[in-house]
Image (cartoon, rainbow, N blue to C red):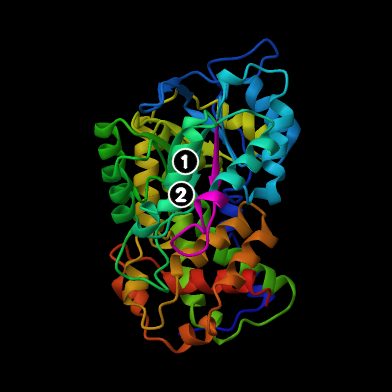
Amino acid sequence: MSSKINRREFLKGATLSTVGAGIASTGAFASGRGLNENSKPVIQEYRKFGNTGFRVSDISCGAPTNEAVLKACIDSGINLIDAGEVYLNGNTERMIGRVLQGRDRSKYFINSKLYTEGDSFPSKKEVIERTNNALDRLQTDYVDCVQIHSAENTKILKDKAFHDGMEQLKKEGKVRHVGISCHGNNWAYDTEESLDTILMSAIEDGRFDVILLAYNFVNADIAEKVLETCDKKDIATMIMKSNPVHIFNIFENRMAGMAEEGKEADAFLQAYYDKYKKMDEQAKTFFARYGIRSDSELKEAASKYVLSNPKAHTTLWDFQSFEELDNMLSLSGQKLTGRDELVLKGFHDHLGHTVCRIGCNDCEAACPYHIPVNKILRYNYYFSVKKQEKRAMTKYARLSLNKPSELCLDCEGYCEQACKYGVWTRPLLAAARSNLEMI
């Protein structure tokens, strides 16, 4: 039987956030094996990067936001930096350009991206102009790879304007390789294609040298077949969203915040409070059974899962602090242990229903209202974990959804019925709605 949420009840006893402090926390990782002259961990492994002729650090820097941290990344041996024309309105590329001045440009692989609404670029001329603008911001004569940013269908992969522009830029020596990044398609408008369909089509196209995809221990069945095919075709792979385990406490954080404010949950949140309480108990059982004292151990195991796969050439990480950088560098070259495997299996068994698999989209295909569940939860990831609130809310607003929270409130739960992973989609949507709509 459902019970009303109040401050006293909610704050009484241990909750998810007291059992584990939140995956975005920066608990100490295992001590690194390789140190530089300042006793700081450094990159321990470099891998063949597809057919690019480059050997890439197993950990790389994604969308840097702090110039001092970016310098520390480079000094530690990280040699791939990911950017995009839309990141910080071009200021990410400007920062990279400043930091690389005076360094040997040939030692660093710079990846940037061009974004377009819809499934085509306006013209070859614009593709060339925008790439030249990126080169100016980067203060370099060439960029190692230009990707189609967040490809959402197979049509964009064939876009003539993009490929004609890249062909000319390659001849001029301004672009060396072409790639794509992909989170899956926009099922609000097209329910015919999936993430693996898009990525496999890019591989078969033959013009893409580098692929950036989401890969972690919970979406392995989706991503690993793509990685396997990339390996056979000698295509370079970059990994994003490698650590999904933060999501289990998003709902708890929202409810705790409401309790602190003395607010009662609305009908939508209240309907899932019983599920939350069950989730809480399962989390306590999980942490206790595996002797986990903080969720930094869980974060470490999840990261090593991806780093242990040689077909995942480099894992992007948007380092927010020196401590976070040191923590991740301590894992360079390390492999998954037997205990790590047990911990990840335990998380999957106890809390797998709290994690949406990026690129799956079965729930969206089943939704009669075509709500882009996967996108909404990804934007909440930006909001809650990356602390990119403005970016997340702007992206969410652009979805032009017709009162999704009200539709979900009265819905029979088609999304949860369709999910083969048993994800509790609606509580996660409730948490996302609370953040992204600022209610």
* Residue drawn at (29%, 68%) of the image: 192
The residue wearing badge 2 is 162
* Residue drawn at (25%, 39%) of the image: 229
Q: Residue furthest top?
A: 37
387 sits left or right of 32 in the view: right
Residue 18, magenta (yes or no): no
254 versus 411 height, above or below = above
Quadrant into which the C terminus falls: bottom right
Tally of numbered tags? 2
Mark 1: which amino acid? Met
386 versus 317 height, above or below = below
Residue 335 lies, in percent from the top left, at 39, 27
Residue 425 lies, in percent from the top left, at 43, 70
Query: Callout 1: few (<14), some (14-19), or many (20+) C-alpha neighbours within 10 Å?
Result: many
In 3D space, how far apart are the residues under numbered discs 2 and 1 (Cα atoms)?
A: 6 Å
Q: Say which mark, if any, is on residue 250.
A: none
Q: Nearer the viewer, residue 284 or 42?
A: 42
* Residue drawn at (72%, 28%) of the image: 99
The residue wearing badge 1 is 166
Q: Nearer the viewer, residue 158 or 10?
A: 158
* Residue drawn at (40%, 50%) of the image: 347
The stretch of residues the image draws in magenta is: 110-126
Quick check: can you spot residue 242? no
Quadrant into which the N terminus falls: bottom left
SS of the residue under disc 1? helix
Q: Are marks 2 and 1 in contact (CB under 8 Å)?
A: yes
Quick check: can you spot residue 204? yes
Q: Nearer the viewer, residue 292 or 397?
A: 397
